[in-house]
Amino acid sequence: MNADRSTTQPRILVSGGGIGGNAVALQLLRAGIRATVVERAAAPRPGGQSVDLRGASGEVAERMGLMPGIRKRQMDERGLIYVDDQGAEILRMDMESFDGKGAVAEIEITRGDLNQVLLDELETAGGVDYRYGEWITAIEQDADGVDVTFASGATERFDLVVGADGLHSATRRLVFGPEEQFSTYLGGYMSFFTMPTPAGLEPNWFSMHSLVGAVNVGLRPDFDPATCKALITIRTDADPALHRDVAAQQRLIREKLAGGGWETGTILAAMDQAEDFYFDEIARIEMPNWIKGRVVLVGDSGYCGSPLTGQGTAMALTGGYILAGEIAGHADDLPQALTRYEELLRPFIAKSQELPPGGLKAMTPKSRFGIKAGHAVTRLMTSKLFRPLMIKMMSSTEDYDLPEYATR
């Protein structure tokens, strides 16, 4: 993107150092606008679940010059295998049969690795004012700017604040209202963490196992063959007591996986040692608007689709790219930039937030009969006859007309 560096550039604060926030900061920096980024964590967060890049998000990664870094960290994941209690194969879906548009995409990378690619590019581009261990505690705005108070006690004024601080966004709460106004609980919880690869796991394949009681466990290959990602999905009633209580979260996982067969014992043993343990509710964020004055939301803060959609990273990366492009193109009229951002991105988000048929209930049957029925439906939908329909369902956002912005 091109920018007149002789003019005074707007002061922009990005709250959140994840995919969306770093995408915004990187593209602004390349346009000559050096943002400030605050991230509550003390350092970049490693690990995270595997994410894919396809359609608009793949195109954004190409345009942003991220692909060389992504290729270096890309996982060799060749498809999905469903296994029984003893680990025997029930059925498999290989990536090539679906042209990289099935459950496993051609480009798969962990969220932490993708974020590191963005951080590396930020450093290469000259860096920004990055503040770890810092976050927003208060926001006051007027027609001309935003006064921000930080956890450290410091106060600063900015022309624009970008909330990119995730599902439980403090920026959204402070400016738009309580989380419960916009969040819909979708029926369960998801956990994932890094663990040593079990000896019997088939290399380069994502293995999945369904347990009686509405629970799924999976092991996904990592960039390093010595490790893999454990993925646990539990369908259950909402329990507010689980929020940020790691001990309670792990008790629930132990209870649900007890006697579950396959590698569940290995997964539970590894959970206590995991340095990147993650657990949260499966929820969707829907908002009538992502803009309020000079505060704007990007990624999960404004339009989380939940992990069920498989589009979280795509929405964050694409949203960050478009927001930065509009700000850079209308730096002298930020309200117009924000309006255009929302208008251009809404159609993409509407499709990206669509849940798969049956939602979490279809993915996590309660009974053994339900598990077998689910496998039968999956076998039918992945057959040669129904494969084109499956590809179409998984490619619903690929016709999105991605705006193009001038590059460096």
Image (cartoon, helix red, strand yellow):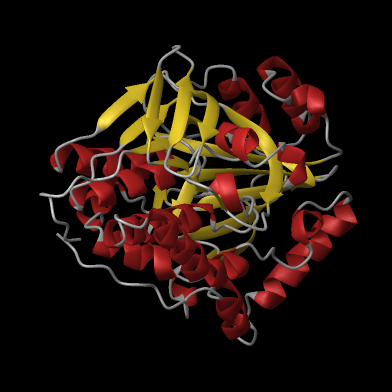
Q: Is residue 274 above or below residue 401?
A: above
Closest to the observer: 49 or 215?
Answer: 49
What percent of the width, then of the height, locates residue 191?
63, 35
Indicate the position of residue 41 as horizontal and vertical percent values.
44, 22
Residue 308: image location, x then y, percent = 65, 55
Task: Left or right? Give the position of 133 relative to 296.
Answer: left
Q: Residue at x 76, y 71 (%)?
A: 377
Instruction: Residue 262 in the image: state x and y as whole percent.
Output: 67, 39
* Left or right: 324 in relation to 151: left
Pick the quarter of the image with the N terminus.
bottom left
The relative height of residue 370 versus residue 126 in the rendered view (above or below) is: below
In-front residue for pair 271/190:
190
In which quadrant of the rendered view does residue 288 lie? bottom right
At 49% across and 16% down in the image, what residue appears?
Answer: 151
Question: Horizontally, is 89 left or right of 236 in the view?
Answer: left
For this rendering, which residue is in front, 109 or 36? 36
Residue at the image point whose x is 71% and y is 46% from the top: 283
Indicate the quadrant containing the C terminus: top left, top right, bottom left or bottom right. bottom left
**Numbered disc total:** 0
Q: Is residue 106 visible?
A: no
Residue furthest top in the image:
153
In the picture shown, does residue 96 fall above or below 65? below
Residue at 69%, 71% (x, y): give it.
379
Res. 172 visible in picture: yes
Question: Would residue 365 appear left or right of 218 to someone viewing this image?
Answer: right
